[in-house]
Amino acid sequence: MSTHSFDPLSLHAWQSRLSQPPRCPRLPLLLNGQAIGSVEPHLLDQIVPVENGLTQDGFSMQCCPDPAASAASWQITGDGARAFTFLAQALYTANLGFVRQQWRNEALAVRHPDGRQVASAERGIFRLLGMTTQAVHLNGRSADGRLWLQQRALNKATDPGLWDTLMGGMVAATDTLTQALKRETWEEAGIDLAHVQALHAGGHFVVRRPNPVDGGVGYVVEHIDWFEGLLPDTLQPANQDGEVIQFALLAPAHVRTLLLEGQLAAEAACILLGSHFGLNG
């Protein structure tokens, strides 16, 4: 997308930025016959023998040609948990796609296209394998109409130093959306979700784009659910996990300036422009 044509106050422009094809055609990644992700050609060749595949205790993995097309797919058969444990260890050792930099010792759910969880895997390998993640955000406002934003830590893998919604975090393998919202609101903002007033669902969107952390070797597929709520004047956000530089309570005009100056993370821009704060007019 040309920077000359990009309008930072356009929700459509930000949505387009978050909906980009992979840098090259990717091979489907299947678990027991169901698509769960995708990989760049020859990526897994570096850890799995292409000729004969790989057989381990409880699972097997092989690159299978598609006789009806010129493409192929990587197929895992058997115990998904064991397969992803092996893949995580092998990818970490080889540090393919900067897996070590994305490693969090946190398990996320591996899901079939219908949403069923079929396994779990280390968060650090999800982008490289093009597997779908889930995230939650909280848009916090004050009674006088100002917005609470956080400035992301400078050591964050994505969007370091940019401004974001009050809270944004991943949904772990053991979380429901509500559990993730509660946990992440405490970890990032030090706020008990029960004290947020008029809490309600704001919207949902899907991010699909090459992973900026690894130069596009991986592919981000992320479902984001965002919520809005009122923070009483007695609540002051206080980060608990070291991932936030500061919080600021800003008038909509100030947030609009951050948008114009390119100081907002793209996901946050979509959420704020999709809310009812009049930032684009």
Image: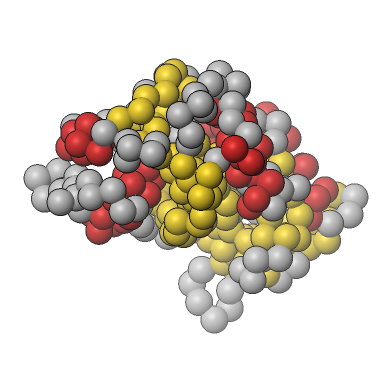
The structure residue drawn at horizontal position 75% and vertical position 60%, both measured from the top left corner, is: 118
Quarter of the image holding residue 114? bottom right
The structure residue drawn at horizontal position 37% and vertical position 24%, both measured from the top left corner, is: 248
User: Can residue 119 be seen?
Assistant: yes
Depth order, front residue of 183/93: 183
The structure residue drawn at horizontal position 28% and vertical position 48%, both measured from the top left corner, is: 277
Compared across the picture, whether 139 is left or right of 55 comes to: left
Q: Residue furthest left?
A: 4
Q: Position of residue 217 (x, y in %)?
A: 46, 44
Q: Position of residue 59 (x, y in %)?
A: 83, 56
Q: From what the image shows, is residue 216 above or below residue 148?
A: below
Q: Position of residue 74 (x, y in %)?
A: 64, 60
User: Can residue 206 be seen?
Assistant: no
Quarter of the image holding residue 35? bottom right
Compared across the picture, whether 76 is left or right of 155 comes to: right
Depth order, front residue of 74/125: 125
The structure residue drawn at horizontal position 50% and vertical position 57%, both measured from the top left corner, is: 201
- Snapshot colouring: secondary structure
Depth order, front residue of 18/65: 18
Q: From what the image shows, is residue 229 above or below residue 203?
A: above
